[in-house]
Structures are given as C-alpha cells and as structure tokens.
Amino acid sequence: MPAPNPLSALLAPSSVAIFGASNDPTRISGRSLRYFREAGFRGGLYPINPTRDTVQGVIAYPDIASVPGPVECAVIAVPANLAVEAMEACVQKGVKAVVMFTAGFAEIGPEGRAMQTRITQIAKDGGIRLCGPNCLGLFNMRIGHTPTFSSFLEEGPTPAGPLGMVTQSGAFGTHLLALTARRGIAVGVWLSTGNEADVAVADGISFMADDPDTVAIACYVEAIKDGARFAEAVARARRNGKPVICMKVGGSAVGHAAAASHTASLAGNDAIYDAALRQLGVERAKTPEDLVEIAYACTRGRLPRSRRLAVVTMSGGAGVLMADAAEEEGLELTPLADESQKAVLSWVPFAAPRNPVDVTAQALNDPSILDKSFDLLLGKEKFPAMVGFFTTWASSPQMAEPLYQAVSGAVSRHPDAYFALSAIAQPDMQRRYEAAGIGVYEDPWRAVEAIAAAVRCAERLHTPPLSVPPLPRDLPPLPKGRIAEYEAKRILAAAGIPVLDEILATSAGEAAAAASGLGEEHLVLKIVSPDIAHKTEMGGVMLDVPAGEVGEAYERLVARVQARAMNATIDGVLISPMLKGGTEMILGVQNDPVFGPVVMLGLGGIFVEVLRDVTFRIAPFGCEEAQRMIAELRGAAILQGARGQPPADLDALAEALSNLSLFAAAKRAEFTSIDINPLLVRAKGEGAAALDALILTPE
C-alpha cells in the first residue's frame, strides 16, 4: 500500500479544530465552520472559543488541549499576536497540519518576517505542515473539508469535480474559482498558499498528482521559491498522467514590483520562467481566460494523442477560419483519403470534402449526414480529435436535439476520440454536452486553440523525459574572483567546450615563436590582463595580423594598452589563429536564485544586443534538448543556411551547449556567471570554437 501523501493531514484530515471560531457565520473566523457544516464534513469538528459553550450549534472548547481525542488539522483565525501561542498549543496536542488565515507576517516587513520565522520553526520542530500564514485557506470538496473563508462558498458547497487548483493569491484564486464555475468546470481540491512559510505551490501539485479523482491541475503563481521542488512536483504529475497549467505573473517591471510586495514573494526573470515551464512540460496560460479555457479543454474526456485534427462544419467561412487557427497552433488538417471524399460527396454533392469537411446546411434536411460524417472521420479516417462548427443549431428547436444525439452518439461509439463543439447552446444543453465529455465553445478560433493546448499537454504526458548525460566528476575547484579569457577557456576546454589552439606570450620574441609554432598565415592578438574587462574598448585586440609581423605587433599592442590603462597589470598577449566565416553565438550561464544554473543561447554580435534573440534552459540537459533550444531562436534560419550561406554545424553547437550545462550543474556552488562570447559556429562538419570567455566566482 502506498505511503500517504505528506499533505494528507492538511487536505484530507479526519478531524479539524478551528481557533477563534465565531458564532457569526459571516465573519472571517465564522465562515469556515459554516462551510464545514454545509459541506457535510464527517470528521471531528472542534470550534475553539473560550467564551462560548457552542459555536453555530457545534460544541465548543476553551482550548485545543480540552478537545477529547486527537486533532489532525487546525485552522488558526486569531490575531498575529496570538498566533504563536496557538501554534505552540497545536504542537502540544499533536496536530499534524495547520491552516493559518492570520496576516501581518513577512508581507508587512522585518518585524512580521521575524514572527513568521518563529512560527515556521515551531511548526517544523513540531512536525506540523503549515499552510500560510496570510492565506485564504483551502478546500477538498470530495470530503467536505473547507478550512477557508473564501466568498466562493457563500452560496453553498460546490460539486467535487476533476480540476485541482493551487494559487498563491487567495482573493484572485477565488476569482479563478468563480470563472471556472461559470465555465462549467468543478474544482475538487483548491489550495491557496499565502506567504508559503512551509507549504508551497509545489506541495499542492504533488498532492493533486496523487489524487485519483483529479484529472488536471491549474496554478496561479507569482514566484516560485524552490525550483527543484517545483520541478519534482510537475514530474510527479506528469508520471501520473495529470497535465499542469500555470498562469505565471510578475513578468513586467510593474508586475514584478507588485509581486515582490504581495504575499512576500519575489518574482524572477520572466524569460527564465517561461523557458523553465516549457522545459518542465507545463502549459503556460497568459490570461485568466487562457487558464480557464485550457483547464476546460483538459477536463473534457480523453486528451488527443496526435496533432491530426478533423474539422466538420456547416459553414465554409467557419471552416476557413478554423483552418487558419489550426495552422497557427501547429495542428495538422490532414486531407481525407480519396475514397472518403467520394463518400462525403455522395451524401452532399456540393460539400467541401477534404478537411475542413463542409457538409453545408443539408443536415437540416437529413440529420443522418451528421452520424455518417462523424463515423467517417473518427472511425475510418481515425482522427484522434475533431471539432464541429454548428453555430445556433445547438439551440435551435428543430436541430438542438438531433445535433446532441449525433455528437454524443459519436463520442459513445468512439471513446478514444476527442470531440469539441463550436456552437451557441442554451445553458442546460451545454451542460448536457459537458456531462457527455464534450467541450462547447462559442468562438470557433478559441475552440481550436483549446484543442491545441490539450494536444500539447497530451504530448508532454506521453513523451518520456529526455535523457541527461552524467555530470563530470573530479573537476578542480574554480579560482576565486574574475577568471579572465585565457584561464576561463582552459577550464571550459577541460569541460568539453571547443577552443582554439592558442599560446600566451610574455615578450615579442615569444609572440613571434608562437606565430611560427601555430603555423597559421594570419593570427589574432589579445591583451591578457585581470584589470581589463573589455579588451576591444582599450585597443587590446588586433585581428588578421600576418604571422611574420606578430613580434612587432605584440610591442605595439602592449604599448597602446599601457597608454590607455596605465595602472593595469598585463600578463601577456594571447596568440591564436584568425578564423573567418561562421556564425557568432553567445552562450552564458547565470545562477538563478530559483532554478539554479540556467543556460542562455543567442545570436552573438549585434544580434543579441539589438534583437535580444535568446532562449534559456535549466541545467543540466543533453544534446536533444540543446537542439530544441537552437530551434527556438527567431534567427535559427541563419544557422540553417539562409541566403545561400552554408548550414552551420548545429551538432557541434548542441554539444557545446550540453557540455556547458553539465559543467554548470557540477559547479553550481562555485560560480555566479559564465560567458562565452562569441562561440564561433563554423560550417557543418567544421565544428565550433569559443573565441572569448569569462567566469565570475564569489570573492
């Protein structure tokens, strides 16, 4: 028998005590008890109120120690100055989980942060899982467990449905609950995490991943504090077949500042978040409507396992619109086989039979056309997903019932298919469709978008995670401080990053000998100094120097730099071959506070500064993931051979990216950033080479 989930005491307890329970069911401290009673919670329910014998008709206790028998979960709805005492009492009683509504902690400043640290330590030492403080609570409608004061339950308990939801904002989480309810999605388990002193979004995802009745998980996130914890939770959901949909806010400058002051969160770089969510297999929603619609699509029957989509319509115009949407979303409107097209034309001689299949309004005269069309597309043609556009037929006195019977019958006969309907239906008819596992969308474009999101979620669930090579071992410690080009490239070369043959010369004679030894006709000279960060700006680089002139060039280069940077220590001049052609790329790593080492890739030179065409990945990763990074660049066509240029050596670039990620993961505690700019990627088969590098480590 599997071990209980670590949050079982919080989200599925057998008994609950409520500190500060009010007899007034409209007050924050009274709502939770009212909701418990209305939802039919069958466990032990113990109001803690020293001034009353009963609260809302339930026997009350002066303190938790007076409660007979064990208490698994407690709700703390008392002022901040009493919260510490309540936490200590919970420890003495053996409580396993606490939901703390109380505000006035880390979100208000240093004094509140210190108090939050204290209650967190009490909880940790006492083996208590703490949700909050400053949270709106949670509910598990499957058992009537409602430790929340959310206004969402004011009109009574809601059905326990297939969607799980985790949110860092309680009030906005309530708004999302209302939106999902209006859309016909029932939420079974809902968790607001507040300040996340202990329980975080990741913990909620893990619980819902294990819940057999949760089909999909939706999240509202301002900031993730522990990237590894979040990644493991998402991986758990993925293993258990649950898509995770996340609305991550705080990407704008203003939004970033707001997130920093709300629930004491600190938002990270949005480009990194976006790449991390994509890499982890999370479907990102941009707006509340996106979140709701994607959740809706993911809770309507079986997810489609292919990008092949059939479109059937009674309107040619709608078919064209949905074809446009499908192309934009990356779905494939595969044409029907010739035999199938002939069958469609035999039913409706003036139909459009390829895909979209336009059966016109002829089904008004012969509704059997619908049955035959659906069976052809889902049966003989075996499309995994289909969307039908039937405008107001779903609310027509003549066609509403025949259309419903045809669509629901097709779903019954083809249970492995995914069927969505774009139509305008009365609320009761829409609920009938939804009960049959069929999503209904008034907007045909939105219907295709939602199906595409469901397809992406299915692809992630059914595609094994990419393999990651082992991290390098026995690497020597990195020096402290700024590691300049010469030493940085030596370190990176040992980690598998390609570099050029090069020689450090400390005199004109050594420079001339180096030129002879390298055997190149033209060379590059670069000043080597720990005090010069930007060599070009100081005149510290000479390009395309003939081999016979390197000794003289050495003296001119050193003199020029000494004149411009009189106090700089010069360690010598780096002599290396002069390469021409190829594409300059920039590779970098930064130690992100959330996800750890994050690798960046972009087009080098002016491209990265002007176009900001970059992409990111969490380290470590293998060459296949690196190839995906390369393909994401807007300028990927340049690497593939644009305007007659030879294709670049993408395999060499991918290998360099992967090796850099492995090195960064192995050295995560020893550096703050790594820059390789540029990495010159030559023509296919010719490899790549790091032309400059810099590693920064803590002093």
Image: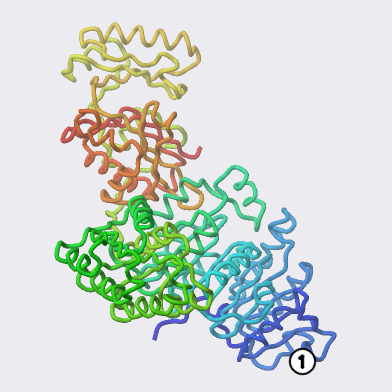
Q: Is residue 119 visible?
A: yes
Mark 1: give few (<14), some (14-19) or many (20+) Cα within 10 Å.
few
Residue closest to the far front = 365
Residue behind mark 1: 57
Quadrant of the image for the N terminus? bottom left
Q: Is residue 260 above or below residue 177?
A: above
Q: Residue at x 58, y 65 (%)?
A: 176
Q: Residue at x 70, y 88 (%)?
A: 46
* Along the line of sight, the residue nearer the viewer: 126 or 51: 51
* Along the line of sight, the residue nearer the viewer: 22 or 478: 22
The image quarter containing residue 31 is bottom right
* Amino acid on which disc 1 is placed: Gly
Q: Residue at x 23, y 39 (%)?
A: 650
Position of residue 374 in the picture relative to residue 613 (left or right): left
Position of residue 569 in the picture relative to residue 690 (left or right): right
Q: Secondary structure at mark 1?
A: loop
The image quarter containing residue 71 is bottom right
* Along the line of sight, the residue nearer the viewer: 608 or 296: 296
Q: How many marks?
A: 1
Q: Residue 571 in the image: state x and y as whole percent.
A: 38, 20
Q: Residue 100 in the image: state x and y as whole percent.
A: 68, 71
Q: Is residue 182 above or below residue 16?
A: above
Q: Residue at x 17, y 65 (%)?
A: 342
The image quarter containing residue 323 is bottom left
Position of residue 263 in the picture relative to residue 412 (left or right): right
Q: Is residue 110 above or below residue 699?
A: below
* Along the line of sight, the residue nearer the viewer: 530 or 257: 257
Tell me which colouring the rendered structure shows. Answer: rainbow
